[in-house]
Image: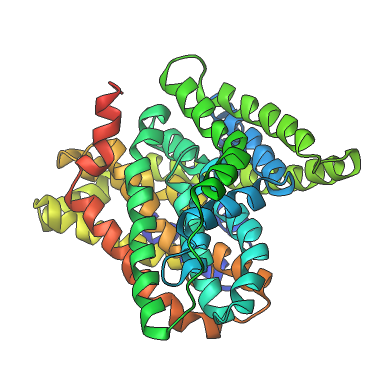
């Protein structure tokens, strides 16, 4: 009964356009009414929201969001684009490869797919159109490649997964995301290469070694942030939360060195960051409350029994879970999806011997696909908005790139070492 009430009430609320965060909270409250009286139910939901946010690890999210906004306005994007162009601009369909590599670099540094889509897309969409690429193809490349930054650390979504899973190592998750993130980017580049040859897109002149070196040195201070953050976490110098505050200071100094940040600009960045942080944290708080309600109603145990009762073959169960997550990703944003469905599916996969770190990478990569699909794909909306086009026109060039992301997901599922090799190498 609790599963039915929770699912139906949530779907109805979302269907009548109640914001997702409030739909989660109201559906949780309605479900709890079936077990306890109304006043204790309201008090319990409020208490779970507050205690859920009382986490040192969660402090990393506001800092990384602020760091991402500082990067977006601090001149980092254009330097990374110049470096990417020097590296891969001479390949067939060169600007598409530049977009992918730049999005991977910027998304990894900023830890945000939305920031990467906005920063890289605002610059690359015009350049690609001037070089003869269709606007819609440019958007398709931009939005799919932007999601790689959620896999290549530092990544806020891995911090959220760590919280939802009950404490999986953030350092291990960060390292586990490297190879799958790079693999996804390489597959997108292969598709872009084939597409460019079929459509006859232009090829730029090969950059000289001096140009590559100059662009690398120009981008090096930005790239060093990755080394500082990941090296500090893996080396035990600081925690992920402390690393996020280091990232803010580093980005602030870098923006001033580049002379891209002013006091007036900084004020706007702080306000915009506060708005984003407020939205994300209320979503996390209400999702944590829903997770507690599901646990209270024994919903994870019931789902585990149902799935294992259907099949105990790990491949069959993983395929079923990934199909469910692909559907969920179409209708729900990544943060609530991770918070709500990690407690449901993690016990199932761990019972089958799947490593929680490996499953975290699978879950994030799966839900990345949903960020590029209507009707809730936030990164798709950003990419379309930046390029001033429509979703309907972008769908066709998106399809082969979707296939590439699904191929990458299948490879990560079938070969756990793609996720686990680096964490095992560093003893995490």
Which residue in the rendered view is the most extreme toward the top? 237
Q: Quadrant of the C terminus?
A: top left
Q: Is residue 4 left or right of residue 214?
A: left
Asked if residue 21 shows in the view, the reply is no
Q: Quadrant of residue 418?
A: top left
Q: Position of residue 36 (x, y in %)?
A: 49, 42
Q: Quadrant of residue 168?
A: top left
Q: Is residue 243 left or right of residue 3?
A: right
Query: Residue visible at 35% across and 30% down?
Result: 172
Asked if residue 280 shows in the view, the reply is yes
Q: Position of residue 310 (x, y in %)?
A: 12, 58
Query: Residue visible at 44% across and 75% down?
Result: 398
Query: Residue visible at 15% across and 38% down?
Result: 353
Residue 299 vertical position relative to residue 259 in the rendered view, above or below: below
Query: Residue visible at 45% across and 53% down?
Result: 148
Q: Nearer the viewer, residue 348 or 232?
A: 232
Q: Quadrant of residue 358?
A: top left
Q: Position of residue 201 (x, y in %)?
A: 47, 80
Residue 336 vertical position relative to residue 386 in the rendered view, above or below: above
Q: Quadrant of the N terminus?
A: bottom left
């Amino acid at each position: 009964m609790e599963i039915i009430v929770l699912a139906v009430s949530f779907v109805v609320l979302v269907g009548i356009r109640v914001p997702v965060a409030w739909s989660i909270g109201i559906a949780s409250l309605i479900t709890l009414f079936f077990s306890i009286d109304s006043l204790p139910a309201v008090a319990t939901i409020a208490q779970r929201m507050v205690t859920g946010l009382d986490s040192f690890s969660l402090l990393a999210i506001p800092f990384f969001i602020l760091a991402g906004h500082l990067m977006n306005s601090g001149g980092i994007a254009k330097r990374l684009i110049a470096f990417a162009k020097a590296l891969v601009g001479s390949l067939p369909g060169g600007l598409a490869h530049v977009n992918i590599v730049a999005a991977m670099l910027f998304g990894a540094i900023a830890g945000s797919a939305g920031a990467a889509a906005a920063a890289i897309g605002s610059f690359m969409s015009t350049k690609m159109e001037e070089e003869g690429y269709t606007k819609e193809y440019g958007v398709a490349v931009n939005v799919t490649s932007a999601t790689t930054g959620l896999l290549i650390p530092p990544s806020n979504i891995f911090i959220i997964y760590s919280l939802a899973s009950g404490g999986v190592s953030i350092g291990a998750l960060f390292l586990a995301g490297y190879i799958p993130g790079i693999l996804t980017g390489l597959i997108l580049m292969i598709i872009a290469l084939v597409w460019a040859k079929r459509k006859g897109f232009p090829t730029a002149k090969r950059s000289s070694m001096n140009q590559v070196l100059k662009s690398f040195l120009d981008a090096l201070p930005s790239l060093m942030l990755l080394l500082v953050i990941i090296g500090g976490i893996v080396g035990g110098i600081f925690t992920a939360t402390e690393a996020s505050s280091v990232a803010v200071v580093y980005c602030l100094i870098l923006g001033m060195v580049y002379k891209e940040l002013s006091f007036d600009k900084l004020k706007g960045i702080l306000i915009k960051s506060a708005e984003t942080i407020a939205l994300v944290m209320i979503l996390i708080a209400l999702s944590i409350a829903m997770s507690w309600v599901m646990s209270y109603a024994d919903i994870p145990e019931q789902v585990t029994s149902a799935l294992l009762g259907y099949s105990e073959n790990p491949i069959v169960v993983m395929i079923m879970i990934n199909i469910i997550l692909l559907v969920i990703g179409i209708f729900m944003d990544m943060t609530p999806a991770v918070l709500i469905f990690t407690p449901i599916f993690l016990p199932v996969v761990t019972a089958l011997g799947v490593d929680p770190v490996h499953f975290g990478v699978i879950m994030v990569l799966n839900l990345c696909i949903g960020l590029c699909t209507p009707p809730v794909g936030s990164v798709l909306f950003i990419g379309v908005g930046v390029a001033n086009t429509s979703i309907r026109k972008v769908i066709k060039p998106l399809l082969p790139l979707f296939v590439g992301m699904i191929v990458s997901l299948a490879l990560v599922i079938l070969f756990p070492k793609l996720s686990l090799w680096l964490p095992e190498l560093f003893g995490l």
